[in-house]
Amino acid sequence: ETAVTDKAAPKTPTLPDTQKVTFVKHWTDRLFSFRVTRPASLRFRSGEFVMIGLMGPVDEKTGRQKPILRAYSIASPSWDEELEFYSIKVPDGPLTSRLQNIEVGDEIILRPKPVGTLVHDALLPGKRLWFFSTGTGFAPFASLLRDPQTYEDYEEVIITHTCREVGELTYGAELIKSIKEDELLIELIGAENLAKLRYYPTTTREESPKMGRITDLMRSGEVFADLGIEPMQPETDRAMVCGNLAFNIEIKDLMEGYGLKEGANSDPQQYVVEKAFVD
Ligand code: A2P
């Protein structure tokens, strides 16, 4: 009798670098956030981004599938056991038109190589730290705002968020609220440290308590008057900036006007900038 070698049926090829979706929340028809499992080996600094995505369609010529990957800021802090992302939905965006349909249990691709300039290491010591954001540019700050170092290193932390409509502020507003109420964070960061955090949301196309672009509100001095502080100075103030391209350019101009210099990982200075994810 000949034993039949039981050649195992070929396994379904598993994609490299896949992670499982554990949570999805849609905030508006243009914005959603989601959480995925974290690769055991992934270490990152709060504020960094990774490439994430989905497999693209089968190429008719080669018969192969290529991943569609985009840079996404990690919105969760580095101590969190999962990874959180905050995304726009672009109806004809190559990635987000499909990514917006993910559900708990689905898999996404995540390349575990975190990089970025919105990190504490790229700034010189200072007294007051500003986070300036528009739209999904809030994401890296959602990470940094939950990092104890943010409060250890500064006496005051101010986050500004400018969006077109009130509903686009909700992800950030709820995060700020939860930070101040979350028992784990209070224990980790300290209630007295969390009291250093000030939140300054503005809208440009829908009525809200504070209207206008943050850039205009800085030029007019309204932001500083509202917060009861002096305009920015290179001796005391540090900033991280993340928003749309026009916003980043305008804020850079303002920072230089206050006498702050742009830094990088290899050359820490007084402010750093990164573009928010776009499509
Ligand atoms: P506005 O409505 O006046 O364009 P978007 O959704 O297009 O990325 O914009 C997000 C927010 O950023 C909007 O409130 C928008 O204001 C604001 N914004 C756009 N460009 C600039 C800029 N150059 N400086 C400051 N804010 C800007």
Image (tube, grey):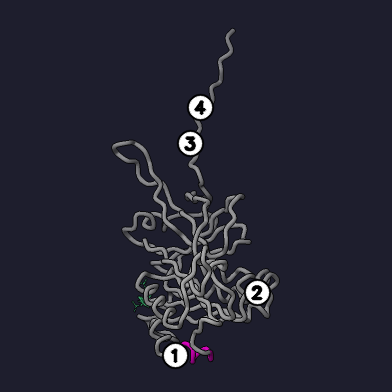
Q: Residue at x 64, y 72 (%)?
A: 182
Residues at marks 2 and 3, CA–CA distance in whole angstroms:
46 Å
Q: Nearer the viewer, residue 107 or 211?
A: 211
Quadrant in which the C terminus appears: bottom left
Q: Residues within 10 Å of mark 4 (few under 14, many from 20)?
A: few
| Residue at image mark 4 | 9
Q: Quadrant of residue 152?
A: bottom right
Q: Amino acid at mark 4?
A: Ala
Q: Residues within 10 Å of mark 3 (few under 14, many from 20)?
A: few
- Circle number at residue 152: 2
Q: Residue at x 59, y 7 (%)?
A: 1
x, y percent for residue 265: 52, 63
Q: Which element type, helix, strand or loop, lies under badge 4?
A: loop
Q: Earlier in the sequence, mark 1 or mark 3?
A: 3
| Tag 1 near tag 4, CB within 8 Å | no
Q: Where 276 falls versus 255 (above or below)?
A: above
- Circle number at residue 13: 3
- Circle number at residue 222: 1
Q: Earlier in the sequence, mark 2 or mark 3?
A: 3
Residues at marks 4 and 2, CA–CA distance in whole angstroms:
56 Å
Span of residues in magenta: 221-229
Q: Amino acid at mark 1?
A: Glu
- Taking the image in four quarters, ligand 1 sits in the one at bottom left
Q: Which element type, helix, strand or loop, lies under badge 2?
A: helix
Q: Is residue 223 magenta?
A: yes
Q: Is residue 58 magenta?
A: no
* Callout in the foreground (2, 1): 2
Q: Which element type, helix, strand or loop, lies under badge 1?
A: helix
